[in-house]
Amino acid sequence: MMAHIPPLVQGSLRMAMEGSSVAKGHPPGWFQRASDLRFTGYSHQGDDTLIGLEVPLIGEAAEELYRQRQLWDTRPDPEQTALEVLRRVVDEVAVENGESSWFDRKLLARFARMRRVFGSEIQALRFPGDDHPTLVNEAVALTAGRLGEITPPSRQVRLVGLLDMIRHSTRSFSLRIESGEQVRGVLESTESVDRLPEFFGRP
């Protein structure tokens, strides 16, 4: 069970911060710090096993990112942790929100693989929260599988606009198209960012 949690936390955090749950290349320092889960012990409460985890606040782990202001800031609250981001993703999957921006096909596939974990010995994984507990169980894994089947795959498109913003730390960029709207994008790897500066401010 525990082996499945770090990849889900990492994918959820990356999705929330960068707009994609996976990336090529060496992970940035802020990401390694913010997704650093430490096991602190366990105890029993009836039939439940309580697992202690220590994880930093995102705002402290990625302080350099939160110093950078964004026009449309969709990042998690800096007072949250990566586990709370994972809870939000699970909630979105559980209600089968096919329009959600909190997951992509690859993250859904990770959740779907959790199905094999649940059985007679493990029924669910519950994350406590101030508003409500969040459950990861077989039903969530099955829902993730269904969502993954209907989520459109990535495809290539040609979009013309002025390269208006480049952010190396999150592999993000924005284009200002003819209508004046901003279109945000996420590059496949940090190496891809290094090729963009020569086009900055140009079509």
Image (spheres, helix red, strand yellow):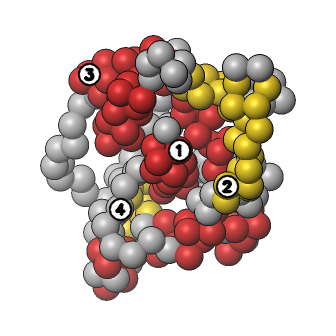
The kind of residue tagged 1 is: Met
Secondary structure of residue under mark 3: helix
Q: What is the count of numbered marks?
A: 4
Is residue 104 found left or right of 129 in the rendered image? Answer: left
Query: In this view of the protein, which residue sits in the foreground, 137 or 26?
Result: 137
Q: Which mark is residue 91?
A: none
Q: What residue did someone put label 1 on?
A: 2
Lower position in the chain sequence, tag 1 or tag 3: 1
Lower position in the chain sequence, tag 2 or tag 4: 4
Q: What residue did someone put label 4 on?
A: 23
Secondary structure of residue under mark 2: strand
Query: In this view of the protein, which residue sits in the foreground, 112 or 182?
Result: 112
Secondary structure of residue under mark 1: helix
Residue drawn at (62%, 34%) of the image: 87
Q: Position of residue 119 (x, y in %)?
A: 44, 18
The answer to the question of whether label 2 and label 1 lie on touching residues, with beta carbons closer than 8 A, is yes
Look at the image and tell me whether residue 134 can be seen: yes
Give the CA distance from mark 1 to mark 3.
28 Å
- Which of pointers 3 and 2 indicates the residue nearer the eye? 2
Q: What residue did someone put label 3 on?
A: 150
Picture quadrant where residue 85 is located: top right
The kind of residue tagged 4 is: Ala
Query: In this view of the protein, which residue sits in the foreground, 88 or 196?
Result: 88
Is residue 76 found left or right of 186 in the rendered image? Answer: right
Give the CA distance from mark 2 to mark 4.
26 Å
Query: In this view of the protein, which residue sits in the foreground, 26 or 100?
Result: 26
Residue drawn at (70%, 20%) of the image: 47
Against 63, is 17 above or below? above
Q: What residue did someone put label 2 on?
A: 39
The answer to the question of whether label 3 and label 4 lie on touching residues, with beta carbons closer than 8 A, is no
Look at the image and tell me whether residue 12 can be seen: no
